[in-house]
Image: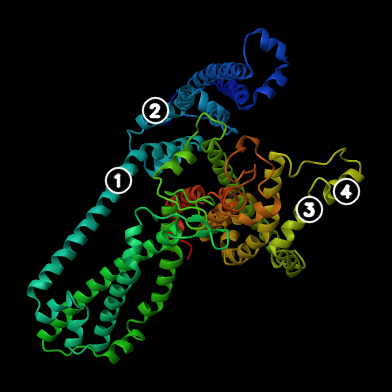
Amino acid sequence: MNTVKKESRGLRCIVSICNFILALVMAATMCLTLLPVKTLKESIGIDDSYIFFLGMSDTSFGSVLRYFAIAAGFALLLISAVTSLMSRVDGFVTRRLAITGDILAMIALFPLTKAGALLLEAKIVFFVLLAIACIPFLFSFVYLAAQMGLRRCTDLEYLKFGPDERHVYTAMCFVLGIPRNIWNLIKKIGMFFVKIGKAIANEVADIFLTFKNGDWKTRVSYFVMGFGCIARGQILRGLLFLLMQVVFVGYMILAGAYWLSELPHLGRVAPQTYIDPAYDVEVTVYHDNSFKILLYGVLTIFFIIGLIVTWRMNIKQNKIAQQILATGKKLKSGKDDLRSMVDDQFHKTLLALPLMGILIFTVMPIIFMILVAFTNYDSLNDGYINNLFHWVGWDNWNTMLSWGDGEVRYGATLGEILAWTMIWAFFATFSNYFLGMGVAMMINKKGIRLKKFWRTCLVVTIAVPQFISLLYISKMFAPNGLVNGFLQNLGWIDKALPFWTDKTWARITVIIINIWIGIPHLMLMATGILMNIPADLYESAKVDGAGVWKQYTKITLPYMLFVTGPYLLTSFIGNMNNFNVIFLLTGGGPSNLDAAGVSGAPGETDLLITWLFKMVTTSEPAAYNLASVIGIIVFVVVAGISLVVYNLMPSTKNEEDFQ
């Protein structure tokens, strides 16, 4: 790495600046594709008469302008890529301006538009531009990988790298490790199913061998649960097994078989209305209930699974009891079982209730929600009062993920809201985190007086219910609210600032207000953690000549990130589902005109969770089926982020590093 020929500083500077400027111009040009036709005409000063003279409609004129912008952006990006390559052949990305230019270029290619015009009208061009933007980075990765022999460098070699070279090397290792990680993931998934297959095969073999080698008591227990335990004197254990079987058989005869038989079609007879001749009034007769069929059908399936597990436990108990008696030992009595539940098996007793709660209140609702996503369940097809609902397969998913050619495009709306949800979660999490940490450090600093008073002032904001404070703040920033009135009285503004009526203003405002809400929580948590950082570390750093910023980046921040890593993850996930702040401040507004006709009428500040809420409360008809699709998407995104980040966090791998 040290023998690589270096360029002259003047050439490097010129090429980097050109690359940066071209990327900016390209980004501005590409932004033309994000504007509606009316705005395009006004911005370039074209009258409708010119469009009519050219023989084009508004739609065709907008398409021509968009394709022109795409072509111009393509040319500029190509030039940017070439200049970037020129500056990197020998320098391995030693110019930060060049890196910034490429990042801006790639960001400009992602059409976070209201209707996704660029992605819809020029899919091929979009992906070509994206590939072109990645060429300089790929070139740097390949070149550096060739210099390193496609191997990981030693610690000594890594220390010889410059700052930018280290960034490129880290990115190179990440990119080159993607195929290996994907292959490892595939192998893990395959091994998981192999283990499941082996476990099932072992269980089946054990059941067969137990029946073959067991005595008559054990064999009868295959058909009458608990018989073997009762016959061997374990009355309590046997009665519990027998009770489970009796309850199951009775339930299946009385109701379970019906729910299972109706589950494939969710009901046969819809509500019927007729005129009662005796009273000459309209009478509605209700028959099947699709909602109950789906709910109790799922419960019945869980009951069957529970019976299978219990039956297997019954077989194991008979096998164990037979083996114990064969050695001449005595079996445990009912009193011994009860004593064991509060002694050596007490952990199972404690976990039984929470496990059942997770099963009933978490697992079952998730499964029910997933099933609803494959039905036409809404307020018009509510399953009982108005009409039955039925299975519709993947129709709801096609609706939600389809970009379509009509006016209602759920896919574009979903993409925009998902992007805003991630942006909101990022800023809401890390702005509170770093600012809260900063407040805690300032209060903890030596020489600061009245520390308890300042902490108390911040804690008071936690004591006030968010329902009250957020609604009050919402009124304060309204067009006729206290803030606008105060600024107008001072003469600083002529008209009310659009805090809640403009998309950009509303999004920035909710992020800033969320900082006011979140800083006190972070301040309290950070205060306790900062007090546990050994003072010797700071003293040693001062002796070595480290300044305040160096101490923060090398001591305070790593310690905080290590300890609060799990909290950051849960905070990010919580902010993705932060219903209170958005709904109480803006109600999801301002209105999103491009989402007109979409169920729930989502606004510009709506998150996925608030859009889901609107779908089932304010939409007509209430789209429970589409809301379930959104719920599944939220679950998949949250679960994916949680699993990946949690397994990458050092605090879950090296727990003793900071002890």
Nearer the observer, disc 3 or disc 4?
3
Residue named by callout 4: 486
Q: Residues within 10 Å of mark 3 (few under 14, many from 20)?
A: some
Label 4 – label 1 distance at C-alpha: 61 Å
Which of the numbered marks, if any, corresponds to residue 186? 1
The answer to which quarter of the image holds residue 521 is bottom right
Q: Is residue 534 left or right of residue 89?
A: right
Which of the numbered marks, if any, corresponds to residue 475? 3
Residue named by callout 2: 143
Instruction: Point out residue 562 in the picture as x, y percentages from the top left corner.
Output: 50, 58
Which of the numbered marks, if any, corresponds to residue 52? none
Nearer the observer, disc 2 or disc 3?
3
Looking at the rendered structure, the kind of residue marked 3 is Lys
SS type, badge 2? helix
Instruction: Point out residue 45 in the picture as x, y percentages from the top left corner.
Output: 73, 16
Label 2 – label 1 distance at C-alpha: 29 Å
Q: Residue at x 57, y 49 (%)?
A: 615
Can residue 245 be seen here? The reply is yes
Nearer the observer, disc 2 or disc 1?
1
Label 4 – label 2 distance at C-alpha: 60 Å
Q: 612 or 542, which lies in front?
A: 612
The answer to which quarter of the image holds residue 240 is bottom left
In the rendered image, the vertical position of residue 159 relative to residue 253, given as above or below: above
